Image (cartoon, grey):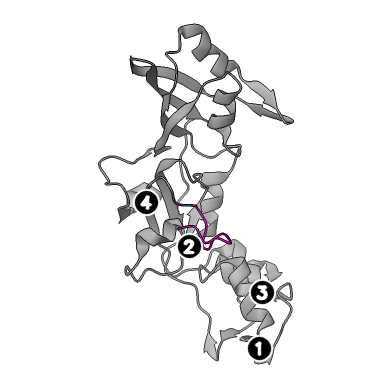
Amino acid sequence: MAWTSTPSADPGQTAISLLAKKHGIARTVSKLGLGSRNTAADWVRAGRITVNGRVVRDPEFPVVIDRDQLSLDGQPLVAAEKCYLMLNKPRGLVTTTADEQGRDTVYRCFENAQLPWLAPIGRLDKASEGLLLFSNDPEWAARITDPATGPDKTYHVQVSVQPDAALLAKLVSGINADGERLAAKSATLIRSGGKNAWLEIVLDEGRNRHIRRLLEAHDIGVLRLIRIAIGPLQLGTLAKGQWRWLEPHEYR
């Protein structure tokens, strides 16, 4: 699936669609790139946000951003400058802002970086590694994660067998598992040796543990799973645990 991103709004500017529509306070704050919807809801319930000078404690209270004045702790809320970055996620980190079990999260990689609020776009499970995108631009995030029109995701996977052409074809043909259709757009052998091999697997949609479940259905063990690309965005030589800002041509 070829993928082309439509131009993002200029930094600091709110999309026209947001300006014209009525949304709940929490969703509006999130769309402005100022925090997650859950965080914004907590601010509202705590009485920290006012609408036109009045405290409102209902996160779903409808507002129109170009009509209503929102403030947090007395300071007017304005759209944040849009930011986009990629991280080479190490294994052992969970893709969440905070973990109820106290496990290390991907935000450990940003310690002392003094970044604005950024949310992960899509997920990589704890045992997986590689390319993970972050942004405070919800419209860009929605385009990337759209199951129908979003970009392909490319993975390098070390497996516990030496697959033949018939097995690779089965991965593309797919299976039905728990009411879901799991299939690879393509599956090719990169190299093999000993008792294992490396595959390149491309997905044109991503379901929970998609590759692991697909391979497990064929009794194939996953030794490593690394995402190396999302559409045209390549992980490249970015070191494990390191991040970089995206260039304008990479997100527009």
Q: CA distance from mark 3 to mark 2?
A: 17 Å
Amino acid type at image mark 1 = Asn
Report the predominant secondary structure element of the magenta stretch.
Answer: loop
Identity of the residue drawn at 57% across and 25% down: 216
User: Which of marks 4 and 2 precedes in the sequence?
Assistant: 4
Taking 86 as reference, is 34 left or right? right
Question: Could you tell me which secondary element the residue under label 3 belongs to?
Answer: helix
Q: Which residue is mark 3?
A: 25
Amino acid type at image mark 2 = Asn
Residue range highlighted in magenta: 93-104
Please state which of the two labelled residues, at mark 2 or mark 4, is closer to the viewer: 4
User: Which of marks 2 and 3 precedes in the sequence?
Assistant: 3
Q: Is residue 27 magenta?
A: no
* Few, some or many residues within 10 Å of mark 2 (<14, 14–19, 20+): many
User: Which of marks 3 and 4 precedes in the sequence?
Assistant: 3
* Few, some or many residues within 10 Å of mark 3 (<14, 14–19, 20+): many
Q: CA distance from mark 2 to mark 4?
A: 13 Å
Q: Which residue is mark 2?
A: 136
Taking 64 as reference, is 3 left or right? left
Instruction: Name which quarter of the figure residue 52 lies in.
Output: bottom right
Identity of the residue drawn at 53% across and 40% down: 150
Q: Which residue is mark 1?
A: 52
